[in-house]
């Protein structure tokens, strides 16, 4: 049995924590006084530092320690979460990611980021209300001081039995306590067993700390934030002679991740043996409120999920074959078993598909940082709005959509949105708006990137197209076709090459990726008001419900979610209607395609043909077929690269009798339908 690599497990959890940290910092920039955001940011930093030290990423722990200290000051109200602090923290987040993903590679820039952090913190503290207090000379490292009654506290704690197993370092905890105030630390050795009975993974030693502070209970709770459920901890004020006894002042340690052993540690006399602590939960540094959610989910490798999907697909094919055999048999028991298996496989398919479906909000959240950085680099104020985050899409598409959406958003910000001066001159607010939205549209998900900028410039696009040889000077072209010129390889209307644009590779990547996902791109623009790029994608790439139809001797599958209705083709309509290929569907004219003509079928047509009305986006078209066979579960098999140029089909599926049926690409057929009708009119 193979066990997961603990280092890789840490990396996976660290990626999630860094993503949460980035979102928290971006939210905090918009709402710097929100205590919940400040606390969640501090906890994320604290968890990354502790987990990093636990798994041997000492460079990460050392780097994060100073940022944790800075946000602790923000949490305590000693400084503010300024935009400058957020900017430095975002740079630090990127540096932490590099330290975790490539721990052995030289990572320059960390000290520069820390220097920038110190400058930001110093500037914020200099602008505070009590600069004189900060200018006081430092207290000597060891100096007697008389502590008044009420500010001497005794902390006693024993760690959970499995604390060392999960990487807790008692010296780090003591170092954090020393940072709270002057203290004396004493080791409690009364429960240490004989040497031959010692388990090196059990923390037998306890600790007593006599601390001078006003009220350290909240700070102590933070120190033991992830250990409190399984440890013994008491925090009590000292009274009488102990409270007035002078205590040595121990200077707070310099910021660091790994500390030396505390100097003031002495062994105490044997004391009353305390009861063994209860079994503790594993020390996983997460928010306490998330513990229930964490226990109800588990991490699964994507490869295993894909393998499960393949197995379910083969089961669906086998079930379809059994159903077909049962239909030809007179055995009632076989029919019953086939029906039961069909019910079970359908439920398993839906469950497995539900596992693959991921809210698109997990993808949308990544682009907030992108827009934040573009706003700073281009000196443009941008309001980034997302809607439809709950819309679910196949995980494979989520992974492959990241790059196309990055290019579209960068294009909208760089080319679409004008500068503040130009926007004011055009009567617009100085802050531009970029909207990212997702919505279900039949069998598809429509993802739109909209900006309120200047819109596409038809003259510049045409000039660049003629310069690149894509158009002749006297060629007539519809606006919709002209807009799609921007997706041609190497096409760019930028006047100069910059770090963001000008090389003409971005939009080409978008087009190729969306084509590979069997999707389409719609472009809409209004001069002076902005543009909208809409990506239309199928809901899944794995298994769909399909309608099986026959055209001549061939059988084809139409995605059932795209089907609106089925009607019979009226008698008397000529095979070649010369532009009159329309049906009146309850007052709406719908163009129709004879699939026999599209596919070049030579077999004689059936006397009573059917029309399947399908939709894609705002368009509709009727597909004339010879016979509607019925509905089935369709396992999508990708076509080979040799067939990539055939646009009418999005894939293939294996039927119950072992034969292959091609899956129709309804989005392409809807688009082709209008052109086919226009061609008939011109003939």
Image (tube, rainbow, N blue to C red):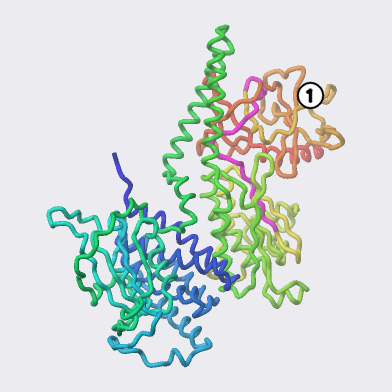
Q: Which residues are magenta?
A: 532-554
Give the answer, above or below, for where 97 lies relative to 215. Answer: above
Instruction: Inspect this view and state whether residue 416 appears.
Output: yes
Q: Position of residue 28 (x, y in %)?
A: 56, 69
At 64% from the left edge and 72% from the top edge, which residue is drawn? 381
Q: Nearer the viewer, residue 92 or 508?
A: 92
Work out which residue is located at the far left of the displayed protein and give it. Answer: 196
- Location of the N terminus by quadrant is top left
- Location of the C terminus by quadrant is top right
Q: Position of residue 424 (x, y in %)?
A: 74, 76
Q: Is residue 634 magenta?
A: no
Where disc 1 sits, the SS reads strand
Q: Nearer the viewer, residue 676 or 212?
A: 212
Pointer 1 residue: 568
In which quarter of the view is residue 330 placed?
A: top right
For residue 257, side relative to residue 40 (left or right): left
At 50% from the left edge and 39% from the top edge, which residue is drawn? 641
Q: Nearer the viewer, residue 25 or 189?
A: 189
| Chief SS of the magenta region | strand
Q: Position of residue 247 (x, y in %)?
A: 30, 83
Instruction: Inspect this view and state whether residue 505 appears.
Output: no
Work out which residue is located at the far right of the displayed protein and give it. Answer: 587
For residue 91, side relative to residue 444 (left or right): left
Q: Position of residue 75 (x, y in %)?
A: 49, 73
Give the answer, above or below, for where 625 lies relative to 453. Answer: above
Give the answer, above or below, for where 447 lies relative to 385. Answer: above
Work out which residue is located at the far top of the displayed protein and give it. Answer: 330
How packed mark 1 is, by other alpha carbons closer than 10 Å (few <14, some 14-19, many 20 or more), is few
């Amino acid at each position: 049995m193979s066990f997961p690599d603990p280092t890789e497990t840490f990396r996976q959890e660290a990626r999630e924590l860094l993503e949460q940290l980035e979102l928290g910092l971006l939210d905090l920039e918009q709402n710097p006084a929100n205590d919940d955001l400040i606390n969640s940011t501090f906890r994320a930093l604290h968890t990354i530092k502790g987990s990093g030290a636990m798994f041997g990423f000492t460079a990460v722990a050392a780097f994060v320690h100073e940022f944790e200290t800075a946000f602790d000051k923000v949490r305590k109200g000693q400084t503010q979460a300024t935009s400058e602090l957020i900017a430095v923290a975002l740079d630090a987040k990127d540096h932490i990611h590099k330290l975790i993903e490539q721990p052995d590679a030289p990572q320059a820039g960390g000290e520069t980021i820390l220097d920038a952090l110190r400058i930001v913190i110093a500037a914020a503290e200099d602008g505070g209300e009590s600069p004189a207090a900060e200018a006081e000379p430092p207290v000597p490292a060891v100096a007697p001081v008389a502590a008044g009654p009420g500010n001497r506290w005794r902390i006693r704690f024993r760690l959970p039995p499995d604390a060392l197993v999960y990487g807790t370092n008692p010296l780090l905890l003591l170092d954090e306590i020393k940072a709270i105030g002057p203290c004396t630390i004493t080791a409690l050795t009364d429960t240490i067993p004989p040497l031959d009975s010692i388990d090196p993974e059990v923390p037998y030693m306890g600790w007593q700390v006599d601390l001078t502070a006003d009220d350290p209970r909240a700070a102590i709770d933070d120190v033991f934030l992830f250990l409190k459920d399984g440890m013994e901890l008491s925090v009590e004020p000292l009274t009488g002679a102990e409270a007035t006894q002078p205590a040595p002042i121990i200077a707070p340690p310099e910021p660091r991740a790994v500390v030396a052993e505390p100097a003031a540690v002495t062994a105490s006399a044997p004391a009353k043996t305390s009861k063994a602590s209860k079994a503790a939960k594993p020390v996983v540094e997460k928010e306490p409120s998330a513990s229930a959610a964490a226990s109800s989910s588990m991490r699964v490798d994507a490869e295993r999920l894909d393998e499960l999907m393949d197995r379910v697909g083969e089961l669906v094919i086998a079930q379809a074959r059994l159903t077909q055999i049962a239909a030809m048999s007179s055995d009632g028991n076989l029919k019953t078993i086939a029906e039961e298996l069909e019910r079970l496989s359908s439920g398993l398919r839906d469950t497995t598909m539900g596992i693959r479906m991921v809210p698109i909000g997990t993808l949308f959240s990544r682009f907030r940082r992108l827009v934040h950085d573009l706003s700073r680099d281009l000196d443009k104020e941008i309001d980034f709005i997302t809607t439809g985050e709950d819309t679910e899409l196949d995980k494979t598409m989520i992974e492959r959509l990241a790059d196309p959406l990055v290019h579209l958003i960068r294009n909208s910000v760089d080319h679409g949105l004008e500068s503040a001066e130009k926007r004011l001159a055009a009567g617009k607010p100085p802050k531009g708006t970029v909207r990212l939205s997702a919505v279900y549209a039949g069998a598809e998900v429509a993802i739109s990137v909209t900006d309120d900028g200047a819109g596409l410039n038809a003259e510049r696009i045409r000039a660049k197209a003629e310069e690149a040889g894509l158009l002749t000077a006297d060629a007539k072209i519809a606006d919709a076709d002209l807009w799609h010129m921007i997706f041609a390889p190497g096409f760019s209307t930028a006047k100069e090459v910059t770090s963001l644009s000008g090389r003409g590779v971005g939009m080409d990547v978008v087009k190729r990726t969306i084509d590979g996902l069997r999707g389409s791109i719609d472009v809409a623009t209004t001069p002076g008001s902005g543009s909208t790029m809409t990506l239309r994608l199928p809901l899944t790439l794995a298994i769909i419900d399909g309608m099986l139809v026959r055209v001549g001797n061939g059988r084809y599958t139409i995605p059932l979610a795209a089907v609106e209705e089925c009607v019979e083709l009226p008698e008397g309509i000529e095979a070649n209607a010369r532009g009159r290929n329309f049906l009146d569907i309850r007052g709406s004219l719908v163009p129709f395609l004879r699939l026999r003509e599209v596919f070049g079928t030579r077999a004689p047509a059936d006397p009573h043909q059917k029309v399947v009305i399908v939709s894609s986006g705002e368009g509709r078209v009727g597909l004339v077929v010879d016979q509607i066979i019925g509905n089935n579960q369709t396992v999508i098999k990708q076509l080979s690269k040799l067939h990539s140029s055939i646009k009418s089909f999005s894939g293939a599926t294996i039927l119950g009798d072992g034969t292959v049926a091609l899956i129709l690409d309804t989005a392409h057929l809807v688009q082709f339908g209008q052109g086919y009708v226009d061609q008939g009119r011109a003939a």
